[in-house]
Amino acid sequence: MITGLPVDAAARGPASWVAAAIAVIALGGCASFSADGGFDAVEQVAAAHLGKQVRWPKSDAERGAIDRRVAQLLEEPLTMDDAVQLALLNNRGLQAAYAELGIAEADFVQAGRLPNPGFSFGRLRRGDETELERGLHLNLARLLAMPMVREMESRRFERAKREAALATLALAADTRKAWVAAVAAEESVRYMRQVREAADASAELARRMARAGNWNKLQQAREQGFYADAALGVARAERLRAATRERLTRLMGLWGEQAQFRLPERLPELPAEPVAMPDVERRAIAQRLDVQAARLGVEQTAKNLGLTRATRFVDVLELGAVRNSSNEAPTQRGWEVAFELPLFDWSDARVARAETVYRQALDRAAAIAIDARSEVREAYGAYRSAFDVARHHRDEVVPIRNRIAEETLLRYNGMLVGVFELLADARAQVAAVNGYLDALRDFWIAQADLDVALIGKPGLAMPAIAGGAPPAAAGAAH
């Protein structure tokens, strides 16, 4: 296997040194950084799937522009789209993920550049004789492996783009769910407080009735129990509101006064009809980024396997030319070639390892595809179920409770039922509305989960080179 050992190329004179240096500079100049650093692919994915802008600030001026945009978004109550846009611009964890693009591109560019040449000088004495030895060193192993290593690093770079796009889409989905949970928690607190107020009024009336001797202790205890449960429900709702709001704050990268952002009073209404996806599995396999990354990983591992097989008998390769001069003898010129004899190590272990890594990559890619099909089926089933439940609450449960409350009020005005029945129906009506709110929240969360299932999840894509690069490539790339 080719290693990164130095190659001796002796100087045939100053002209030869200059020619070699020019060649190195010319070849090295072919590998350069792109204008966008690979971020254009992330911007395209964000625009296609989210309709949002993403930024990768690399200067204080760019960071300042983002801060101004964040301040502008915080001036009004945050809609779901605004919250997603704010998170995509301001989440520092996402910015750190984008930095992986720069690292991958640097490795890609490095793989396309020749190593710097080295010069050696030796001075030997034998009695009165002085011998001078000069040599120019160039990494020939790196030169031979450069096309294959550059292709591997190119695939690494493509994989980094997909991972950055996945991180962007996943953050958007998490922010949507966090926004839905936070708004629902705010609304739930308001409804639970209404339940508590009704229970408080009922408990107070029960106390007065008991003091007047019109109620027994059991009836009074029941009303006091309703109030105690309602007060506990308010406390739990307020705790949930604080937790969901803090999660949304973290995802949007806000702190200090920014954390005092405002949210709308209500969740978006339920759509008229759910989205029909008869080909949901095919769509997922075609567009999921983790499946694409797995395919890319298999192709790259196959390339690595071919490199391992091609170089199994070439472990050390040295080519050199020498020029020795002495003050008592003519100048000596010549060349030499050195290589390692495969007497003990035939590299069969390295080839076997590479073949096993390839089979592992195939199995992982197949597992990701199978999981993708299952995940998208599960997500779509949950989406349809959540829609049906929310619609049932909206069209059946809440209207029935409203009619019951109206009929109870009519009977109360006609002195056919008492005030306690009226208060109990009011509590039940609020509970029905709160149940619809929970179902609506679950629907929008299921919608976000379906969006994620259709595009893939970070961490599922296999490494670009499963099990690591072959030793030759690793040595030549750095």
Image (cartoon, rainbow, N blue to C red):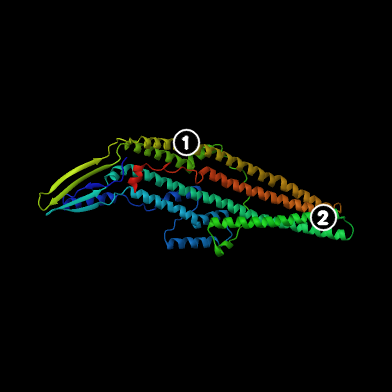
Label 1 element class? helix
Does residue 52 appear in the picture of this structure?
A: yes
Report whether 57 appears left or right of 137.
right
Write down the quadrant of residue 413 in the picture. bottom right
Q: Earlier in the sequence, mark 1 or mark 2?
A: 2
Report whether 192 appears left or right of 331.
right
Q: Which residue is mark 1?
A: 363
Write down the quadrant of residue 277 in the picture. top right
Q: Residue furthest bottom?
A: 257
Report whether 416 appears left or right of 331.
right
When the figure is inspected, residue 470 is found, relative to residue 13, above or below; the finding is: above
Label 2 element class? helix
When the figure is inspected, residue 247 is found, relative to residue 282, above or below; the finding is: below
Task: Depth check: give the residue in front, 337 or 371.
Answer: 337
Amino acid type of the residue tagged 1 in the rendering: Asp
Q: Which residue is mark 2?
A: 221
Amino acid type of the residue tagged 2 in the rendering: Ala
Residue appearing at x 45%, y 46% in the figure:
162
Task: Depth check: give the residue in front, 226 or 394.
Answer: 226
Packing grade of label 2 (10 A; few <14, some 14-19, many >=20) is: some
Give how far across and how far down residue 134 sits, in percent: 19, 51
Q: Are marks 1 and 2 in contact (CB under 8 Å)?
A: no
Disc 1/disc 2 C-alpha distance (Å): 64 Å
- Tell me the number on the disc at residue 175: none
Give how far across and how far down residue 246 sits, in percent: 59, 57
Give how far across and how far down residue 309 sits, in percent: 34, 36
Residue appearing at x 50%, y 39% in the figure:
368
Report whether 53 appears left or right of 202.
left
